[in-house]
Image: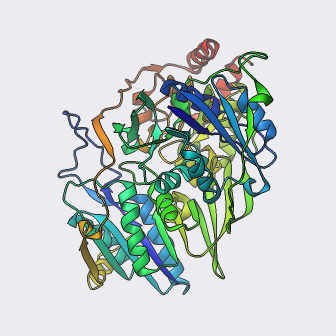
Amino acid sequence: MKILVALKRVVDHNVRIRVKEDGSGVETENVRHSMNPFCKHAVEAAVQIKEQNKAKEIIAISIGPIEAKDVLLNALAMGCDRAILLKTEKEQKIEPLAVAKLLKIIVQQEKPDLVFLGKQAIDDDANQTGQMLAGLLDWPQGTFSSKIELEENRVNVTREVDFGRAKISMPIPAVITADLRLNVPRKTALPMIIKAKKKPINIMEAKDFNVDLQNRLIVERISEPPKREGGKILNNVQELANIINELEAEK
Amino acid sequence: MRILVLATHDQNRLLADNARIIGAAKKLGGEIDMLVVGHNVRDVAKNASKLEGVNKILLLDDKLFSRPFAQLITPLLVQLADNYSHIITSSNSVGRNIFPRLAAKLDLMPITDVIKIHSINCFDRPIYAGNAIETVKNEQAKTILTIRASEFEKVGQEKEGEGEGEGEGKIENIKIPKLAINTSFIEEYRTKSDSPDLTTASIVVAGGRAIGSKENFALVKKLAKKLNAAIGATRAAVDLGYAPNDWQIGQTGKVIAPKLYIAIGISGALQHIAGISGAKKIVAINDDIDAPMVKIADYSLIGDLNEILPDLISRLKQK
């Protein structure tokens, strides 16, 4: 069993982002970046499968600027065996469709049995890439997974859906996207990172892959959402009850 | 221009989202058809046909579609796509699963989680957990959208005898393309609850980590029952086992836009706020006056939840 894990470098989830005044985007210069949290769960799931001796090799892949090497190093420290970086220009934004097309080429070269991705990235919140890749490959998809169980030539995935959870069984190969309750990603200590530096990271240029990287959607502007102002601090439960009774009567 | 709406349902009932998705589709203008696909879903199709503004229902009723697998519904939509300029659905767990796959098959970039429609090809969607709004223009051959239902007004039901061929007459059976699936359904875990649907409820009561235990969460439920409100929770409360996963509100959970949101013991993490920005009024009950939730709430009461909640429940008018 060979697993490919796709991951994205994003603005760290603890950073309070700033929208640029000219509407051109979100400030990303000199802002802490890290591995997208959902991708961490995808890496952890793959590593756990390898630790159960059910996978031989885990390959981490990222598409992004040269700095994405850092998140790949993190994935290697968590337990991936080698990494691939499809390098883009520094400020180049690549849409999920182009990402899925690039990943498809790598899948065809590497022939993994499973591809794991985070269900969404916390920057563009698109929640698209995994489903698109599965479509382009004509593979089954198990999205928003909170449990993955391997069986002979099949994989069972418990999905988090609006009414609760649903468990499905898919033939291998398949694409699986990770939700936050899938596992608890391990922390990477310094010795693990030092050891990971010996693992190979193969860097290639994204533009050399014969995939149209031109964006399809035109971003007109990025703006701040309307601000909410804090209101009144109430003195006692009766005041609160009066307010709820009033608001309820209004509706 | 013609719009195709994929109806979302649980095989028995049309989900409440659909009336709002039609509301959004009407903003685009043009003829609106709805696809109802499932098994034994004739009643679902009938109910869909009554939604105001729906031109006709395309119905595919087949055992193969007893679960809404993306691998099955995608090729069906691809086959229908030629006739439509816009294909849209709810940004719920069914729509989010299917539509990116559909878009990739049509070699298109979809626009997911639309919260505002400026024109037939210009839309707003939230990014960075709602801390920024992206306005995007689409100049591709077709427009594939998932819509955040809570951000749009619902349409009503057409009255009997109104419009041409209401009800049954509007339903057109469509032929099944040659399809097969090797993915199978094993089991599901449905949260049993008689409270209203979270994403469309007009009052939502939610609890966070500070509730402290699964037992204490019963107080949140009791308050919700008294107000006939839907029940929500933060990711922390779900992770701690106080509440089931489908009650989670936020960036990765459900997005709500009630008239009144009551946040109990919820500190107000960015990821949670992402799910409640559409709430008209927010009331916070919290023991920490510096909590981010208190900073954005219209009204806050500071104190011990275990004392406040039973007292509050007894002082509220019975519905």
Q: Is residue B133 visible?
A: no
Q: Nearer the viewer, residue B220 or A44?
A: A44
Residue B202 position, x and y percent, is 62, 25
- Residue A217 lies left or right of residue B223; in this view the side is left
Q: Is residue B119 visible?
A: yes
Residue A161 position, x and y percent, is 62, 51
The picture quadrant where one finds residue B20 is top right
User: Number of labelled discs?
Assistant: 0
The picture quadrant where one finds residue B196 is top right
Q: Nearer the viewer, residue A20 or A102?
A: A102
Residue A12 position, x and y percent, is 31, 54
Looking at the image, residue A58 lies above or below residue B316: below
Q: Residue at x 23, y 34 (%)?
A: A23
Q: Nearer the viewer, residue B142 or A136?
A: B142
Q: Residue at x 36, y 44 (%)?
A: B128
Looking at the image, residue B83 lies above or below residue B97: above
Residue A193 position, x and y percent, is 30, 77
Q: Residue at x 53, y 49 (%)?
A: B99
User: The C terminus of chain B appears in which quarter of the rendering?
Assistant: top right
- Residue A33 lies left or right of residue A164; in this view the side is left
Looking at the image, residue B265 lies above or below residue B118: below
Tell me, what colour scheme is on the image?
rainbow
- Residue A248 lies left or right of residue A45; in this view the side is right
